[in-house]
Image (cartoon, rainbow, N blue to C red):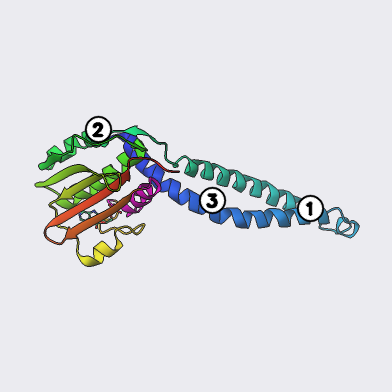
Amino acid sequence: MNEELIQSSKMAALGKLAAGVAHEVNNPLAVIREKAGWMRDLLEEEDVKASPNFQEFVDAVDKIEQHVERAGTVVHRMLGFARRMEPVCNDLYINDVLKQTTAFLENEIRFRNIELIWALNPDLPTIQSDAAQIQQVILNLFNNAIDAIGRNGHITVKTGYEAETDMVSISLRDDGPGMDKEVQRRIFDPFFTTKNVGEGTGLGLSISYSIINKLGGSIRFESEAGKGTEFIILLPVKHHD
Ligand code: ADP
C-alpha cells in the first residue's frame, strides 16, 4: 500500500493522542513552572543564601526550570502537530476521491480474489471537504472490509445524493462474516479490535468517526453476523466551520 497513506493514517492516530497528551501535560507543567519561579525568588533571601546547601538549591532550581522548558517545547510541538489535523476544505468530486483511493488497493484486492463492484451516481454535486481526510476514512473502511472477507468476496461501493439534507452519501458494503451485537456495540471505541496483535490497532474506526464528525457529516453501519457489513457516510455539500 502507498507509503504516504500509511503514514497519514499513523499521523492521524498520533495527532489525536498528541492533542490529548499535550492537554494533560500542560496543566501540571504550568504548576511546576510557577512553583519553580517561587523557589527562584526564595534564593534571593538572605537566610536561604546562608544555608550550607545553597549551591545545591540553585542547581536544583536550574535543573527544574531547564527541564520544564524542555517539556514545554515538546508539548508545544505536539499541539502544533495535532492542529495540522484540522480539515483543509476544497471542492471535491467524491466519485473521483473514491477511485483514487481504491487505486492504492487494487493489487491487494486482486490478490485476494475480491470483486469490486461500482455503483457510483454520476450526477453527484461537488462538495467542500478535505480530500486527504476522506481518503483516510475510505481506506480504513476498505482495509476492514478486506480483512473481514479474507479471500473470495465482494465489496460494493455506492454513492448518492440526498436533496432534502443536501448531503452526499458513500456506502461500502462487504459480504464478509459481519459482526455480532457485542462487537457492533464497541467498534467505534478507540483501541477496540478483534484482530491479532500487530494486525489491528483498534484506532481506524474511532479516527474515522471523529474525522467525519469534524467534516460535518455522519457515519453509521448495518451488519449481520454471517451476511456482511455496510458502512454509510453522509457528507455535507457545503462546509460549515
Ligand atoms: P482495527 O481495524 O485496527 O481492528 P477498527 O477501529 O478499524 O480497528 O475496527 C475495529 C473492529 O471493528 C475490527 O477489529 C473488527 O472487529 C470490526 N470491524 C470493522 N469493520 C468490519 C467489517 N467490515 N466487517 C467485520 N468487522 C468489522
**211 falls in the magenta region:** yes
Residue at image mark 1: 40
Q: CA distance from mark 2 to mark 1?
A: 61 Å
**234 falls in the magenta region:** no
Which callout, 2 or 1, points at the residue further toward the start of the chain? Answer: 1
Q: CA distance from mark 2 to mark 3?
A: 36 Å
Residue 205 at what x, y percent from top left? 31, 52
Q: Nearer the viewer, mark 2 or mark 1?
A: 2
Which callout, 2 or 3, points at the residue further toward the start of the chain? Answer: 3
Q: Residues within 10 Å of mark 3 (few under 14, many from 20)?
A: many
**Tag of residue 22:** 3
Q: Given the image, on which type of amino acid does mark 2 rest?
A: Asp
Is residue 159 placed above or below 205 in the rendered structure? Answer: above
Mark 3 residue element: helix
Residue 135 at what x, y percent from top left? 30, 39
Q: Are marks 2 and 3 in contact (CB under 8 Å)?
A: no
Helix, strand or loop for the magenta stretch, by majority: helix
Residue 1 visible somewhere in the drawing? no
Mark 1 residue element: helix
Residue at image mark 2: 96
Residue 179 at what x, y percent from top left? 19, 60
* Label 3 CB-ligand 1 distance < 8 A: no
Instruction: Determine whether, in the image, residue 225 is placed left or right of residue 192.
Output: left
Q: Residue at x 31, y 45 (%)?
A: 235
Toward the bottom, the furthest residue is 182
Q: Residues within 10 Å of mark 2 (few under 14, many from 20)?
A: few
Q: Residues within 10 Å of mark 1 (few under 14, many from 20)?
A: some
